[in-house]
Amino acid sequence: MIVLENDLIQEEINGSNSVNLLGIGLVSISGNRANTIYKKGIGNGLLKTLVKFYKDQIIKKREGKIIDLLGSYTIYIHFFDIKSDIFTIFYVNEKDKLIRYDNLCLISNLLLKSFCKNSSEAKINIVCERVIPKVSGVTALFIISQAGHALFTRINKEKKFLIENYIQIGGFLSAITAFSQEVIGKESGENLEAINFQNQQFILKVKEQLIFAYLLENNMNLDHVNRFMELVAEEFFDLYHNQINNFNGDIEPFTSFKSIVDKYFII
């Protein structure tokens, strides 16, 4: 496999050429088939909507650019005719938010090079971090079943106590969430959302009988990180739907989720 070198990417796209957007999706379109290559900051539902809405225009032109308003978003689409495929990049941004369009074109050219050279997802992610930067200040992530099984953990290596006691912590988070649902949510339907932990805070997101517990620094701005929390949960269910529904105690299949978490958070 031919790949782009890290130093080449860093030379061609530096901090001054970054573009901070809401989401990006790379899709290969061929006939009626649309294959998602990579996405970040954008859910499956929205990406499928974009492909469905713009697919006919892309196939007709086969190469070009589209800028459009769709609801509360501005959509930028760059697409390239690569033999039988059309390599398509969907950029999603807040409506009326200005960007440096020349920088966006530079990023598209780098992504096109990556696609043509069959670059790994890790190499593509290096470019896409200039579009959607990772969030720092997250110390740990626990994904726990309501039975108390820690399906996945990602813990900062400096947090020795958490690493040594992650099983007990998972059980505690599961128990206190169940207790809160019984006491707090029995009448209101609400769940416990945060637990103070020393000088940090656990933020709890309960999705389809799983608990996503993030340990954050107290001074973090949650507005941005909340979007990433929702997307991480969505990607977990998409990847491991069968393993979750037929869980037999084996957590090995979930270890590959590290690459998804590392797209969004610096832990």
Image: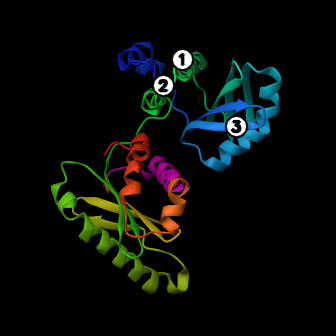
The amino acid type found where label 3 is placed reads Ala
CA gap between label 3 and label 1 equals 20 Å
Where is mark 1, residue-wise? 113
Q: Position of residue 189 (x, y in %)?
A: 54, 79
The amino acid type found where label 2 is placed reads Ser
Q: Position of residue 106 (x, y in %)?
A: 55, 16
Q: Circle 3 — which element?
A: strand
- In this picture, residue 210 sits left or right of residue 215: right
Mark 2, other Cα within 10 Å: few <14 / some 14–19 / many ≥20: some
The question of residue 231 being in magenta is answered with yes
Q: Earlier in the sequence, mark 3 or mark 1?
A: 3
Residue 29, picture quadrant: top right
Q: Position of residue 62 (x, y in %)?
A: 76, 21
Where is mark 2, residue-wise? 119
Mark 3, other Cα within 10 Å: few <14 / some 14–19 / many ≥20: some
Q: Check whether the beta carbons of the residues at disc 3 and disc 1 lie within 8 A of each other.
A: no
Which disc is residue 34 wearing?
A: 3
Of residues 24 and 87, which is closer to you in this image? 87
CA gap between label 2 and label 1 equals 8 Å
The amino acid type found where label 1 is placed reads Lys
Q: Check whether the beta carbons of the residues at disc 2 and disc 1 lie within 8 A of each other.
A: yes
Which disc is residue 190 wearing?
A: none
Report the magenta residues as a range: 219-236
Residue 195, picture quadrant: bottom left
Specify the quadrant that holds the N terminus. Answer: top left
- In this picture, residue 22 sits left or right of residue 153: right
Q: Check whether the beta carbons of the residues at disc 2 and disc 3 lie within 8 A of each other.
A: no
Residue sitting at 45 percent across and 85 percent down? 182
Q: Nearer the viewer, mark 2 or mark 1?
A: 2
